[in-house]
Image (cartoon, rainbow, N blue to C red):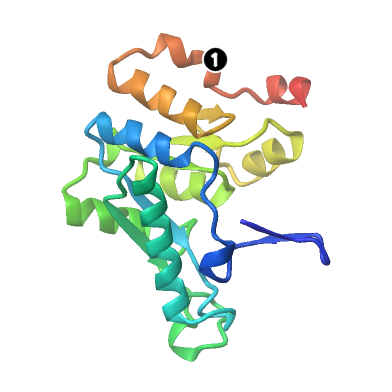
Amino acid sequence: MVMDPEHGTVDSPGNPDELQLMSGAAQAVARLNSLDLMVAVVTNQPGVAKGRFSRELHHAMERKLVEGVEAGGGRLDAIYTCLHHPKAKLEELRATCDCRKPKPGLILQAAREHGLQLTGSFMVGDGVTDIEAGQAAGLTTLFVGPRKCYTCDALVERGSWPNYWVENLSEAVDVIAALEHGDHASVSRFVPHCSTLRQSS
C-alpha cells in the first residue's frame, strides 16, 4: 500500500519503486513453505483497468514481489490477479466478473489448477473482501490487522466474521502451524469476539 499525503488516502502501488514488502512477509512465507503448504497470492489489481499504469508495470511489480519474497528466503508458488473493474476506462477490462474479490473465482481456479482441498486451506488477508472470498470458497479465514471497532463493525455488517484475528503475518503463521498440527487449543485466543474487540480498541 502507498500513502498519498496530499489527499490522505491509501492505494495500491503504481510502479515497482512504490512496492514494498510488509515487514516479516518474506519470512512468514518461508515458514509456510516449510510446512509444505502451497502459497498463492490472490489479489484485485484494477490499476491497469483504471488507466493508472500499464500491463508492463503491473508485471514488473509482480516480479519485484516474487524476488522480494525470494530474497527473504520464501517462495510464492502462484499469483492470481483480477485486472477487471466494473467502471474500467479500458473496455476490455470493464466487467462484473467472478474473479474479483469478494467473489471466490481466483481461489477456485487455484484449487482446480493445483489440486487443492479447500476445506484444508487458509485465506490470510487484511481486507473484508479477503475474508468474504475465503468464506465463499470454504477456507479457514485469518484477518490480519489491529483490533479496531470500525473494522469489527465492517466485518459484522458484511456477515464476514473471520475464524481467527491476528495482529501480523507472523501470528497468522503461528495459527496455521498450530492448526496443521491439530493444536486447536493454543489458538483459541485468536478466535475473535466482538465485545472483546470493542474493549481493546
Q: Residue lying furthest front in this view? A: 71
Looking at the picture, how far across and down is residue 193, in whole percent? 62, 22
| Side (left or right) of 130 relative to 121 | right
Q: Judging from the image, what secondary structure is the residue with disc 1 in? A: helix
| Side (left or right) of 69 relative to 112 | right
Looking at the picture, how far across and down is residue 174, in whole percent? 42, 23
Q: Nearer the viewer, residue 134 or 77?
A: 77
Q: Kindly indicate the quadrant of the structure image that contains residue 13.
A: bottom right
Task: Say if residue 177 shows up in the picture.
Answer: yes
Q: Is residue 89 above or below residue 194?
A: below
Q: Residue at x 54, y 15 (%)?
A: 189
Q: Residue lying furthest bottom in this view? A: 91
Q: Which residue is mark 1?
A: 189
Q: Nearer the viewer, residue 177 or 185?
A: 177
Looking at the picture, how far across and down is residue 8, in whole percent? 81, 60
Q: Nearer the viewer, residue 99 or 38?
A: 38
Q: Residue at x 26, y 50 (%)?
A: 77
Looking at the picture, how far across and down is residue 79, in whole percent? 34, 58
